[in-house]
Amino acid sequence: MAVLFDLIKSGPPPGTATTAAEQWIDLGSITSASDFIVGKAIYTAPDKAITFELRTNNLTKSAGNTTDTTIMYSAAITPKSGAKTIDMYLKGRIRTATVISTGVEHWWLRLVAKSATAGGYTYRYYYALE
Amino acid sequence: MSLLIPIFEGKISGNGTTSSKDDYFDLGAFGSLSPITSGKQLYLGYLILISQDKNLTFELRSNISGQSTGTTANTDLIGEGACDPTSGSVVVDFYFNGSIVNLAPLVASTGVEKLWIRTKSGTNTAATWQVFLYYTLI
């Protein structure tokens, strides 16, 4: 059966926690001459409220910081909200995509929280190469 | 060839800090739409709201024709939603599978009208906010 979003990126390893109010997670490089289009995300944050910002590097950039990246989607997850499925596609009505890579750009997950208290988190993306 | 040509091709990502019970923010300024392009309206799709610090009510407003300031007298309420730190982000649906239509401003821009986010809360405690707006300019 053919599916639109046929790739999965998930993490982190079990037991990993974020221990900062802001943390950047490198999701890897974007395939050269292509972009990633993201369909769904599933997030959990069982210990503290975390905002998950999915970001793409700007053209020719590769570092994880706000200057060199553009936000693609943002979602706030809390212990009360439980696992949240985020629809970044909405039956084709919206588009959540990285830049078309020149070979150096990465996609990033930026975690933002109110405190540096240790907090577990998980992410899982369903995406496609375009 | 693109896999996806979305209905709502425009996206504004706005954020800020409110330190009062009632604040106006020029949302269009985050997306080169301040003012809204003359002769155009935003056909609205979805609005995503985030507030990690305190309970906030968000109002999406656009100026009435010929006005450009962020006040209740000079704006129309287009849509609203509430977000609290424990519940996570909220998605406001302005489209409902094509069964409703929401336009901002209510009539085509004369070239001066702006798009506003009004934040309201019960306290003056400082709080950050973040919104995403999906739209198509028509």
Image: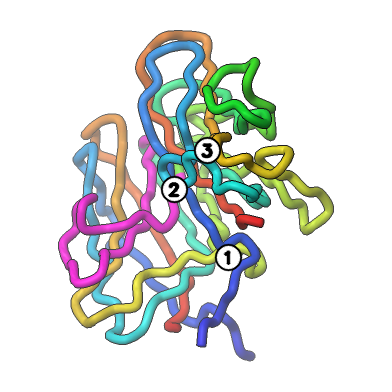
Residue A39 or residue B61, whichever sits in front: B61
Q: Are marks 2 and 3 on the same chain?
A: yes
**Which disc number belongs to residue A89?**
1
Separation (CA) of disc 2 from disc 1: 21 Å
Q: Are discs 1 and 3 less than 8 Å apart at CB?
A: no
Q: Residues within 10 Å of mark 1 (few under 14, many from 20)?
A: some
The three-letter code of the residue at mark 1 reads: Tyr
Q: Are marks 2 and 1 on the same chain?
A: no
Residue A68 or residue A4, whichever sits in front: A68
Q: Quadrant of residue A56?
A: bottom left
The subunit carrying tag 1 is A
Mark 2, secondary structure of its residue: helix
Quadrant where the N terminus of chain A sits is: bottom right
**Which disc number belongs to residue B31?**
2
The three-letter code of the residue at mark 3 reads: Leu
Q: Residues within 10 Å of mark 2 (few under 14, many from 20)?
A: some
Judge depth for marks 2 and 3 and give the one in front: 2
On the rendered structure, is A36 left or right of B73? left
Separation (CA) of disc 2 from disc 3: 17 Å
The three-letter code of the residue at mark 2 reads: Gly
* Residue A9 position in % (x across, y down): 38, 71
What segment carries the magenta color? A48-75
